[in-house]
Image: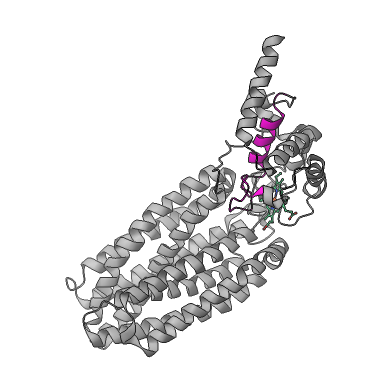
Amino acid sequence: MQAMDLLGMYPTFYVPGIGTGWVMGIIGVIHVVASHTSVGASFLFALIETRAYRRNEPQLMDFIKRYGLFLLIFSYVIGSITGPGIWYSITVASPRGVGGLIHNFVWVWAAEWVFFTVEVIGVYALVYLIGKVDARTHLKITWSFALASWTTMLLIVGILSFMMGPGSAAWYRTGSASDAFFSSNCFAQLGVRTGLMFVMASVVGLIVASRLPDADTRRGMVRFLALVGLAGGLFMALMSLFYVRTLPHNAIVLLDFRLLPDYARDLAAVLAVAALWLVFAWCRPDRVYTSLAVALFAFVAVAGVWPEERMRESMRKPYVAGRYIYGDQVIARDVPGKGIKEEVDRIARDGLLTLHPFVPDRLRTINDGNLLEAGQLLAKMACASCHALEPGAPLRDLPDEFHRATDEDLIAAYLRGPLRHGTQPYMPRIDLPEDEIRALAHYLAVDDSGRDVDRLIAQERRHALLARGKE
Ligand code: HEC
């Protein structure tokens, strides 16, 4: 086969046990917590400092200094580790998804990087120049820090929204960055995140405020943070309603039938606990102890942000970006504006094992000696971006999706039916030739039984080698 005929695919990356998606998810959620706290706090600083300046209340600067220092360690160290961590993990897990984003938004990313640099310099300047430059200059630094922080968020949210879909359908024809960027989903998501950033900055701020030595300043700051958090939460809730209205059909299906039944109760509980905590802080500012504030922060971050981000990521299925790249990296439709061609039908005709460049030669054609191993590779290439393969693994594990079925024909019927015809709105159309369906069904049937697949594959290879030796 000519190199020209292969698909432009990258090697398949699979993390057993938890599933590749969860690796990105865990890193991403830590990053969201750190970054939203920082952007929210930058506005808190700007508001508090404006008040300190106007009313001549320099003691408020003590809180800004402490919180700023806390951010330097908490948000900036953690954010700077997890930020590149996201890049590394998405690049190996979804190389074409990342490629799609870069080919659309390289200048947006460059701009984001400039604002991020301003933000990082800003936070250092803010913390270390308190008392060293005049108050007015310092106030300007703080506002620049806040605006630069929020601009990085605006730019990243525009890029993230393209993952749900391009701003306008004209993009498929024009391929232009402005058609890709501005969508109502982008503004809705920006609204949700703006509310969330105030909630996070308030919840983390209470930890810092609880340690202020001066009782009056402490009370004042705790109450201010509680109000900001409640207002941010309300705004986030309203914007979430708007956000849901901007979603495409497949996302609504997934939300209604799969996600809300699982998550709605938990999310409502987290919101209620967070709201009660902030109301309590407002009523009893002297009872906001550091240990309590830390516990509530951890609760909101783990029980609130994790399901919220998980839902947003899940809803995009079957696509990973622009409603043209499927989660399994296959191109779903023609995009003339970028010279991109649909690939599903080519795979149906020639097979994934033939067209994918990173397939060992011994698995290019299926025979009795490699049925199981070829099936496993097909599952990794075609399913594992969205499904873990091990029974009981957290990322929609395939054995449980098949209700642990071990009947090859039954599984093959599913592959020939709903999957081939793309009838499930949350799954790609995956149309494989008959021999690949047989191999995949064979592997899934064994895998679903919970038997040790890797040992069976080793056995299969030994048999094949022996058989070849006899010839
Ligand atoms: C782009 C993501 C994606 C890919 C790739 C994918 N699936 Fe799915 N699949 C989903 C989602 C999302 C669900 C909904 C399950 C849930 O949320 O519990 C699902 C559900 C299922 C179900 C449950 C029955 C149903 O129709 O809802 C089965 C079985 C299944 N997938 C099999 C497969 C197989 C086999 C492959 C590979 C050939 C595959 N999937 C590839 C996303 C994907």
Q: Is residue 281 left or right of residue 124?
A: right
Q: Residue at x 58, y 38 (%)?
A: 12
Q: Which quadrant would residue 56 be assigned to in this image?
A: bottom left
The answer to whether residue 203 is above or below residue 333 is below
The answer to whether residue 3 is above or below residue 25 is above
Q: Which quadrant would residue 165 be assigned to in this image?
A: bottom right
> Where, quadrant-wise, is the N terminus in this rendering?
top right
In the rendered image, residue 154, in percent from the top left (x then y), is placed at: 49, 65
In the rendered image, residue 299, in percent from the top left (x then y), is placed at: 45, 70
Q: Residue at x 78, y 44 (%)?
A: 411
Q: Say how the picture is coloured.
A: one colour
> Where, quadrant-wise, is the C terminus in this rendering?
top right
In the rendered image, residue 24, in percent from the top left (x then y), is placed at: 51, 52
Observer-nearest of 249 and 384: 384
Read off the magenta span.
Answer: 369-398
Give the residue furthest to the top.
471
Q: Would residue 88 be visible to someone looking at this image?
A: yes
